[in-house]
Amino acid sequence: MARITPPVRRRLSDRIAAAATRRMFGRSLEPAAVTAHHRGVLWSQLLGEVVLLRARHHLPERLRSLVEHRVAVVIGCSWCIDFGAMLALRVGISAQDVLAVPDYAASPAFSDLEKRAMAFADAATATPPRVTDDMVAGMRADLGDAGVVELAHLVALENQRSRLNHALGITAQGFTDATVCALPAVHAAAPSPAAVTPGRGPA
């Protein structure tokens, strides 16, 4: 249960937003319900997510989902792991690949680019961040400038989501099977960028 319960009385606009998320995902989203206590926080999040959904994506959908899921795993946000796993399954990522994200560097399930993108996510999520010029140069060669900007923004955004949910005690809602959305016991043990060897994943 979240550390702060949702408000008993909600504004009409908030109820409309909740109805929209129920249509999209089958249920209301607890983070939105809790942040409804602060209208500015709620709507800045919702509008930002809508704009992001409608924006042109320079990254493949699979890569986006894997990076978001990796950040949630590193931070240890069970809600984001649960919700992110559902979204990953929706775009065709297998449950086996979702379960391999905590140990992605050693997994043959991911391409070299996917591994380096998740290593970038680890480095950008670390405190203090440890992204290097070489990492960015490698990403630029594969993704272009717009792709690197999108990647960095995606990592920062998932950090914001995961850390907010974690701080408020918002936990998994059961969007996916308990095995798929389980919080890994070693979620904080992010491998160093050097541990991701180019060429180990499928092309």
Image (cartoon, helix red, strand yellow):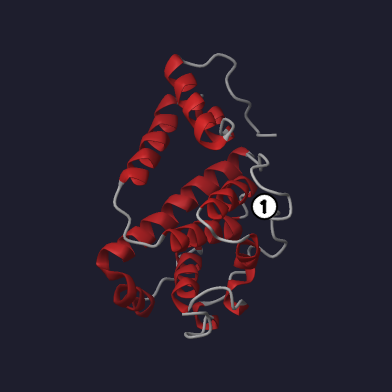
Residue 115 position in % (x across, y down): 50, 74
40 to the left or right of 71: left
Q: On the image, which quarter does residue 192 sit in?
A: bottom right
Q: On the image, which quarter does residue 129 sit in?
A: bottom left
Name the residue rendered at 59%, 24% in the picture.
6
94 to the left or right of 144: right
Residue 107 position in % (x across, y down): 61, 76
Say few, some or many: other residues with alpha carbon within 10 Å of mark 1 (under 14 / 14 to 19 / 20 or more): many
Q: In which quarter of the image is the N terminus?
A: top right
- Which residue is the site of mark 1? 181
| Image height of 185 relative to 164, above or below | below
Name the residue rendered at 47%, 65% in the picture.
121
Question: In this orientation, which residue lies closer to the viewer: 161 or 167?
Answer: 161
21 to the left or right of 185: left
Number of disc labels: 1
Q: What element carries label 1?
A: loop
Farthest residue in the left direction? Answer: 145
Name the residue rendered at 37%, 61% in the picture.
152
Residue 188 position in % (x across, y down): 63, 64
Residue 161 position in % (x across, y down): 50, 46
| Image height of 64 relative to 144, above or below | above
Which amino acid type is shown beneath numbered disc 1? Cys
Q: On the image, which quarter does residue 142 sit in?
A: bottom left
Name the residue rendered at 68%, 55% in the picture.
180
| Image height of 44 relative to 73, above or below | above
